[in-house]
Image (spheres, rainbow, N blue to C red):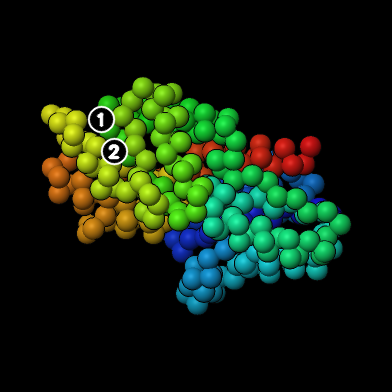
Amino acid sequence: MNKGILIVSFGTTYKETREKNIDRVAEEVQEQFPGWQVYQAYSSNIVRKILKNRDNLIIPDTREALLQMAGDGITRAVVLPTHIIDGIENSRMKQTIEECRGLFTKIQTAGVLMEKEDDYRRIAKGLWEEIKSLAFNSPVILMGHGSAHEADSCYGKLEEVLRSYTGKEIYIATVEGSITIDSVIDRLNRLKREDKRALLLPFMLVAGDHAINDMAGEEDSFAAKLKAEGYEVQCILKGLGEYEHIRNIYIEHLREVLD
């Protein structure tokens, strides 16, 4: 077998959400492309160090994984990022790929989750089905990571698509981007709703540290800030990798490169 697919994720130190999300994507890729050898890499050095020291789990970074693939005799490689936007992490990954291009006869890169116009619609459709199944009629806030990169604007675009598709009060707030939870709370407060409830869900591949602490934590979290404003908050700790429609988008991006 001289064909390999490398799945690049930021990574997580939480075993359960890793298995439910990152590993589930990898399993599905292997199921859909049985003639290809599937590899994984994590871009976060901190995550990789913790996993090595705590669990004796060694996961390579992108460069190490590409070197391993070449050493295994892979001549045609495809890299699938599980990144949400084409931001800082994805740019670093693509730079590494360029530096390693000479290791392979052919190497290609698939798109991130929010790569094309149709991706936004498919994401909105699938998330709306999930939200409807929860029978929750109050405002919904999705927590994204956010970025200092210009691709951060993708989060605002997704909010527009979600609102247009559903006709409901759905907001995006980011941990490190331009759309903050404080700005979303200001928008909510201006509506002067009598029903002060809100549903929080992570818009990240895994429901890891950000979801557990920054979204649902007891102090200085999205949930804590909403509660301080008098909102009753429900948190759903479910990563995007658990949603079939999200995994299907990644698979489709792979197919586009392979066809």
Which quarter of the rendered picture does the C terminus lie within?
A: top right
Q: In the rendering, at what x and y percent does residue 190 appear? A: 18, 34
> Which one is nearer the viewer's eye here, 233 or 90?
90
Residue 248, quarter of picture: top right
Which quarter of the rendered picture does the N terminus lie within?
A: bottom right
How many numbered marks, from 0 up? 2
Separation of marks 2 and 1 at Cα, in angstroms: 7 Å
Indicate left or right for 221 with 93 as reference: left
Residue drawn at point x = 75 percent, y = 50 percent: 108
Q: Which kind of residue does numbered mark 1 sit on?
A: Ser
Counting residues from the start of the chain, the first of labels 2 and 1 encountered is 1
- Outermost residue toward the bottom in this view: 53
> Which one is nearer the viewer's eye here, 186 or 206?
186
Indicate left or right for 254 with 1 as reference: left
Residue drawn at point x = 18 percent, y = 37 percent: 189
- Residue 17 showing in the rendered view: no
Q: Which kind of residue does numbered mark 2 sit on?
A: Leu
Q: In the rendering, at what x and y percent does residue 144 appear? A: 41, 47
Q: In the rendering, at what x and y percent does residue 39 appear? A: 68, 58
Q: In the rendering, at what x and y percent does residue 146 appear? A: 43, 51
Residue drawn at point x = 86 percent, y = 57 percent: 105
Q: Secondary structure at mark 2?
A: strand
Q: Which mark is residue 138?
A: 1
Q: Residues within 10 Å of mark 1 (few under 14, many from 20)?
A: some
Query: Which residue matches tag 2?
Result: 199
> Which one is nearer the viewer's eye here, 235 or 175?
175
**Against 180, is 95 above or below?**
below
Residue 209, quarter of picture: bottom left
Residue drawn at point x = 69 percent, y = 42 percent: 254
Indicate left or right for 181 with 226 as reference: right
Is the residue under label 1 in contact with that under label 2 (CB below 8 Å)? yes
- Residue 134 showing in the rendered view: yes
